[in-house]
Image: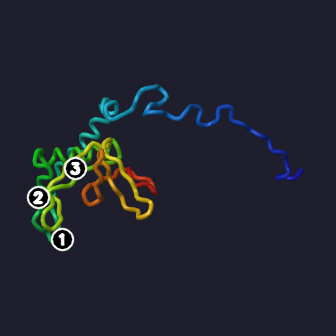
Amino acid sequence: MPLFGRKRVQTRDPDPFPPWSPPIANRNLTGVAVNDDTSLGIVTVWRCVDMISSTIGSLSIHAYRDGERIDTPPILMQPNPTEQRIDTYSALITSALLRGNGYALLGDFDRFGHPRQMVVLDPDQVRVDVNQATGAITYRVGDVSYTRFEMLHLRGFMRPGHIVG
C-alpha cells in the first residue's frame, strides 16, 4: 500500500473552539467584569501603570527644529493651566496604557494655528470616525466633532488597518 494512498482517519475535536459564547460587556469566563477599576485593583497592574506613566510624565521636555534646540513651546511646559505638567502627561499615558488610546483636546490656538493648551479626555467619551469617501478622521465627543488638528490621539498597541489602539 503506497504511503499517500492510506485511508485517512477523520478526527473531530469533541469540544470545538470556542467552547463558550464570546464575552459580552467585558466579562470573562469567571463572570467578573474587567475594566480600568478592576484591573487597577491588581497591585502589579497598578504599580506598572503608575511607574510607566509617572516616569514618562516627569521626563524633561525639549523642543528641536532642524536639529537645533529652540525655546520650548508653552503647551509642552504647561499643557493644562489647571494641572501640573506631570499630571497631564501621566493621565494621557495612563489612558493609552489601560485603554489603548489617549485623547487630549487641543485649544487656545495662537495666530499661527499652534495650540497652547490641551485637556486630557476620558477615552470612553471619544468616538473616532473615518469618512469613507475622503478618509478624513473625525473625533466625536458628545455631539461635537473635532478634526485631527484639534485632537491629540496617542495610540497604544495598534493592529494593521485599525485607526485606534
Marks 3 and 2, how far apart at CA: 18 Å
**Residue indicated by mark 3:** 56
Nearer to us: label 1 or label 3: 1
Q: Nearer the viewer, residue 70 or 33?
A: 33
Helix, strand or loop under label 2: helix
**Residue indicated by mark 1:** 65
Question: Would you identify the image quadrant in which residue 91 lies?
Answer: top left
Q: Residue at x 34, y 43 (%)?
A: 99
Q: Please, what is the three-letter code of the amino acid marked with disc 2?
A: Pro
Q: Please, what is the three-letter code of the amino acid marked with disc 3?
A: Ile
Q: Residue at x 18, y 65 (%)?
A: 113
**Residue indicated by mark 2:** 74
Q: Is residue 134 above or below residue 26?
A: below
Q: Dot 2, how many residues are within 10 Å of its Cα: few (below 14), some (14-19), or many (20+)?
A: few
Marks 1 and 3, how far apart at CA: 22 Å
Q: Position of residue 33 (x, y in %)?
A: 40, 29
Colouring mode (rainbow / by chain / secondary structure / one colour): rainbow
